[in-house]
Image (spheres, rainbow, N blue to C red):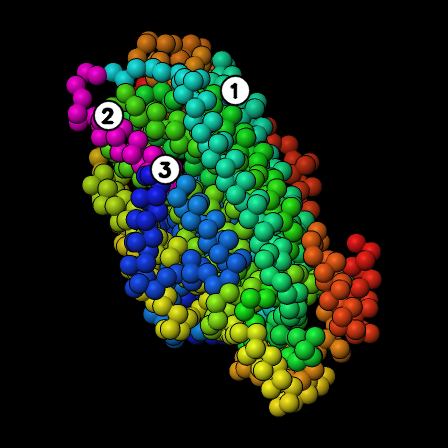
Amino acid sequence: MNLRRIMMVLIFACTTILAGCQPLKVLDPKGPQARTTANVIWISIGTMAVVVLVVIAMFAYLIIKYRASKQEEDYEPPHIEGSLKLELIWTAIPVVIVAFLSVVTIISTFKVEDVPEGYSKEPLVIYASSSNWKWHFSYPNEDIETVNYLYIPTDRPVQFKLYSYGPISSFWIPQLGGQKYAMADMVNTLNLAADVPGEYSGRNANFTGEGFAEQTFSVNAVSPQEYTDWVEEVKTTADVLTKEKFGELLQPGHLGQSTFKGTHLTFSPPPENHQMGEKSTEKMDTDMNEMNMGDMEDMDHSNMSQ
Amino acid sequence: MNFFDRFAVPNPSITIYASMIAIALTVIAIIAGLTYFKKWQYVWSEWLTTVDHKRIGIMYLISALIMLFRGGADAIMMRAQTAVPDNTLLGAKEYNEIFTTHGVVMIIFMAMAFIMALMNFAIPLQIGARDVAFPRLNALSYWLYFFGAMLFNISFVIGGSPDSGWSSYFPLAGTDFSQSVGTNYYMLALQISGLGTLLTGINFITTILKMRAPGMTLMKMPMFVWSALVTNFIIVFAFPVLTVALAMGTMDRLFGTNFFTTENGGMDMLWANLFWVWGHPEVYILILPAFGIYSEIISTFARRNLYGYKSMVISMVAISLLSFLVWVHHFFTMGQGALVNSIFSVTTMVIAVPTGIKIFNWLFTLRKGKIEFTVPMLYTLGFIPIFTIGGVTGVMLAMASADYQYHNTMFLVAHFHLVIIPGVVFAMIAGLTYWWPKMFGFMLNERIGKWAFWFIAIGVCVTFFPMFISGLNGQARRMYTYSESTGFGIWNMISFVGALGLLVGFILIVYNIYYSTRYSPRNIPGDPWDARSLEWATPTPVPEYNFAVIPHVDSSEAFWDYKKKGYQLFRDPVQSIHMPNNSGLPIIIGAGFFVWGFAFVFGIWPVVILSTLFIFGCLAYRSLEKDHGHYIPVSDIEIDEQGGSVQ
């Protein structure tokens, strides 16, 4: 155990020093989901470091000890078939390691797929859709929409509904949690939350063609009060998102950030299939009902029939 | 689009024009050279029409080396482009074409061909056979591969290369988002060469199961033969999936079907599933023969028998079964839910168990050995630590929750290069160096070989280790550039330096081939490495029929027993030998497929129909042809064997 801790400290020291004292984004979490994955990554790095060290130590010992130049000219290596005992040992040890990592994986995977625990508020639902090469964020309850930037309140779960107006894209905010695909024929759900206020970078991580590299967005995590203020401000100052305007936004290319009143969900609803095996279906249904939007009813039915 | 417009390259640049000229000059030089030296007859009758597994192996080898440099040039351009932030060396479109062709060329046309080269050359020799089960089919496999590769490579100068990634995900690869003919090339070139691979699979399973020397039971086969048997079973089960997926993709692109579209009931996720149902076993198609080669080399140069033969075999079979149960780990992020992801995480991690068994068996083969650090052994020893690092990062990627953060990042790129390069590329260079004297009758220079090894081994680490860090810092893969504020610059610069080291290593290998061809002594014995398996029981150069007398075997190291214990390998009298005749049909059918594929890419339907009829005509001709091969009389065999070294 001690060895593992030393290794972890060493690796951490190396990576941070090398990175110019700036922690790597994935290992510098700002929310519960990213924290869970960062912990999983550290556990796996620690375990794997032990494996690598054992193999390399054995390897170095063997090639130094049994090199030909160290041996008698007439030394004839013996014929050894193998050893059931030894071979069982190096089957059993990996099985134990894999079992351990499997338990870690299963627990953490269910955890990061679910709505993060420990928050009193209901999740904020945001529809995040990609088009070549932009991100559109619709806030159905607030009835506003942004392009290429997000405002989210801290200390409240955020539930992203992901889909695409083009190729498969992958929605990723490294410091808040792992990524998930946005696809044209299915809506995926990604549960995140931010604990620390700040501006985080997000991007599409899945190759979508010519403008892929610049398909980024920024995430502003602000206090709930600031968030409410921002929503109010948008509602009073922003232009209304019309069908024509949204059609223009969908044209391939890059855009800066922009803000609208109303969402495209009313005239360009998301695809009807939802993520299978979704655990938060009930919650989502209540969100949907709260939204009270007639054109969303189709989706409600598709959920209920699942 | 105008008919002729489609033949133009969509984004021409100086590199493309330069390569057009280079291709033209090379073709002219080859034609002129063959004509000037009056070698047409020789090339046609000795090589292009050959059905000899050794020569087919050498042709695969040459093709694989050429493709290695094509794919390597792509790699250097990618590393150069990303070496500094906001670089403008390449544009997004060129970069996208380059990383796509880099992936396809390296996996399909380099690594696969390299494996085919070594399997073709060594397997019949190792099992004491005179050729493969279906020699002419074997030639057809090669020519399908060759013309598939050529079709893929001309996309660069005619019509444009594919640019939607080597995994070619729909709908990006569909006509909505990829209008140029590039993805048509991808679909058809892979289809043609995949067909060749499938035929090889059938051929080698039959060869290994039916043509082993008397006494060589399955558990007495050399480990490379075992790995080839398992690999070819994977090929036969996995490649039909690719065939079907490519056919569906081709129909979506050319006939307007809706298999992978996002409307009318199409499902883009289906392509990803089909691709990886083939794609993951494909990874093991590459790595298992490499494991076989390492097993041969490690026991040769540790001067010991392979430790734990049985568990080596069992672990390979286990890996081959598991390889079909893990494909979802390529898209944990597709939203199939925590339960499905957990199941596939566990199946993926379980692969670490048989792989670990193999690593420890190799380590224990070194124990009590007498290790000689020859060039093949250096690559084998270099493989163990680097592959272990690549392998354990694979276990990390297998953990679904963590994979949400690694997916599509440079971390993944680092992982798979650190398993494929030490796993496959090292094995290929090691195998090439190891079997080179048997192929060509002289040794490669050890000194230059060692220099090349150190450049390549260190180059790999310097190139790919920094990517773990930039990946964890949020660098997605396949980005043609990034801004300075991201902080990725330093890691990418280190990678570029490492890539230059790799380049030097590979140039040294080429120089070594040139140097050794000129200066290496030619009077080498048939068994220069003091090795253990049957291929070394043949004289050098190996006669057409391999063995004048078929050997008898009663252990997995019969040749070693022959040398050390006085075991009698060759007991039967010399008899006349029945060998297959050469045939021009395979290359002609291959050329027919090339025309078919090219016409298909551009939708020139009359030519497609004509070439389809032509191909079927050739098949009919072959079915009705009476060709019983020829006999080599005893007198000729004895003349040949006088120069032989063993008997």
Q: Position of residue A24 (x, y in %)?
A: 39, 61
* Residue B238 magenta-highlighted: no
Outermost front residue: A120
- On whether disc 2 and disc 3 are found on a single subunit, the reply is yes
Mark 1 vs mark 2: give the one in front.
Answer: 2
Q: Which residue is mark 3?
A: A1
**Residue A56 included in the magenta stretch of the image:** yes
Amino acid at the residue labelled 2: Tyr
Cα distance in 3D space between marks 1 and 2:
31 Å
B516 relative position to A24: left or right: left
Q: On the image, which quarter does residue B346 sit in?
A: top right
Quarter of the image with the C terminus of chain B is top left
Query: Can residue A145 be seen from the camera position used here?
Result: yes
> Given the image, on which type of amino acid does mark 1 rest?
Leu
Instruction: Provide residue B419's location: percent of width, then percent of height.
Output: 42, 45
What residue is drawn where x is 58% and y is 82%?
A230
> Would you say residue B121 is visible in this rendering?
no
Q: Which residue is mark 2?
A: A66
Is residue A242 placed above or below B419 in the rendered structure? below
Q: Residues within 10 Å of mark 1 (few under 14, many from 20)?
A: few
Magenta residue span? A48-75
Magenta highlight: main SS: helix
Q: CA distance from mark 1 to mark 3?
A: 44 Å
Instruction: Report the residue at 32% width, 21% height from top.
Output: B304
Q: Position of residue A99 (x, y in %)?
A: 52, 35
